[in-house]
Amino acid sequence: MLAHGVGEHELAALRTALGPDDIAPAAGMQVPDHAVDVLLRSLDASTTLRDLGVVVDRSNLVLRPRGRDDGTAALAIERRPTGPAAVTLFASTDVLTRAARGGPSAALEAARDLGALLARLRGRLRRGDPTETWFVGLGSPEAVRTTFDLETAWQERIVAGLAEETSLRLADGVAFVAAANRRAMELAFSRMRRPPFATHGTPIETGPAQFVLRARPGVAFGRERVAARAVHAADAAAVFAAPCGDSVRARGSSFDELLARFWMRAATLHAECADEVSMPVRGGPGAVATPAANVDAGAVTRT
């Protein structure tokens, strides 16, 4: 399970509701921007597992309609026509959604509810042995003091003369700008470095003809007031709770390393030829899976 809006305090509340012995102790970790997308692209080994006869259910990540709450999404997994998969991936959004309405304090109550939901899922997905849970919290919500209507400011101050050469895509904490050419990108970038944009965000070039405007602390982008938003990955105090050994928890773990261990554990538990498995996980050197013999005992999930 990957949970938006969950950091150390929210995970503690979740463990209390779930039962402290039902999920591994928590530890800090690093997470990339758009962790769910990274999991589905460069860190996805589900095809390899399927080739080994291991059923992986990714439907919650790839087929979940926008706005569907965690409870409704969980029902879809519980009612899977062919029964529980050996490995199930789940992305939780309720904690962050409720924090956006009620502030960071609302996230704690939402985390307790998520713990109850996780307990239910563990029971429904169990196939014999107790279900193992690998949990990643992507960081506590950040309180918002100011909501900046970036879209209106964009239309009034930037689009003139660049309407056909640039496009804007918004999230609460970041805006993505793509340009048709380098010149258009530089003009838009230059304007973003001046007020009112620079007052509320920092432009960062991400490619030859694209950049992002990252919201400053306490700022969110949008027309409607929000009380909290997702923290930037670079600043997130993300956490994981997975049965992968005290040594890993003591030193922390990167997201790609944890996913490599996750997929290898899945192969070790469920594939008949686990001793011969080599898990190709696309990405940098840190994304290469650990051989099965070196994976700590006691780890992968159906939740």
Image (cartoon, rainbow, N blue to C red):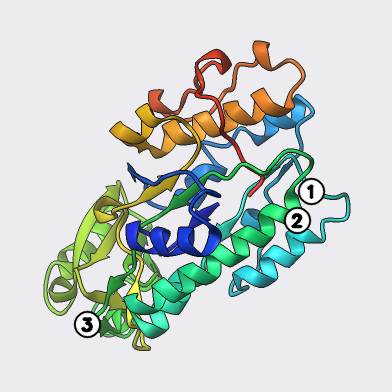
Q: Is residue 41 above or below residue 278?
A: below
Residue lying furthest top: 276
Residue lying furthest bottom: 224
Q: Which residue is located at x 45 percent, y 28 percent?
A: 287
Could you say whether the residue bearing mark 1 is in a helix, strand or loop? loop
Residue 173 on image: x %, y %: 32, 68
Q: Amino acid at mark 3?
A: Arg
Q: Which residue is located at x 13 percent, y 75 percent?
A: 199
Q: Residues within 10 Å of mark 2 (few under 14, many from 20)?
A: some
Query: Going from the N terminus, do you reach mark 2 or mark 1 first?
Result: 1
Q: Is residue 121 above or below residue 253?
A: below
Q: Which residue is located at x 47 percent, y 23 percent?
A: 288
Q: Residues within 10 Å of mark 3 (few under 14, many from 20)?
A: some
* Label 2 – label 3 distance at C-alpha: 41 Å
Could you say whether the residue bearing mark 2 is in a helix, strand or loop? helix
Left or right: residue 97 compared with residue 76: left
Q: Indicate which label's residue lies in the foreground, 2 or 3.
A: 2
Q: Amino acid at mark 1?
A: Pro
- Residue at label 1? 84
* Label 3 – label 1 distance at C-alpha: 43 Å
Q: Amino acid at mark 2?
A: Arg
Foreground pick, 124 / 219: 124
Q: Residues within 10 Å of mark 1 (few under 14, many from 20)?
A: some
* Label 2 – label 1 distance at C-alpha: 8 Å
Query: Going from the N terminus, do you reach mark 2 or mark 3 first?
Result: 2
Circle on res. 145:
3
Residue 28 on image: x %, y %: 32, 45
Foreground pick, 16 / 112: 16
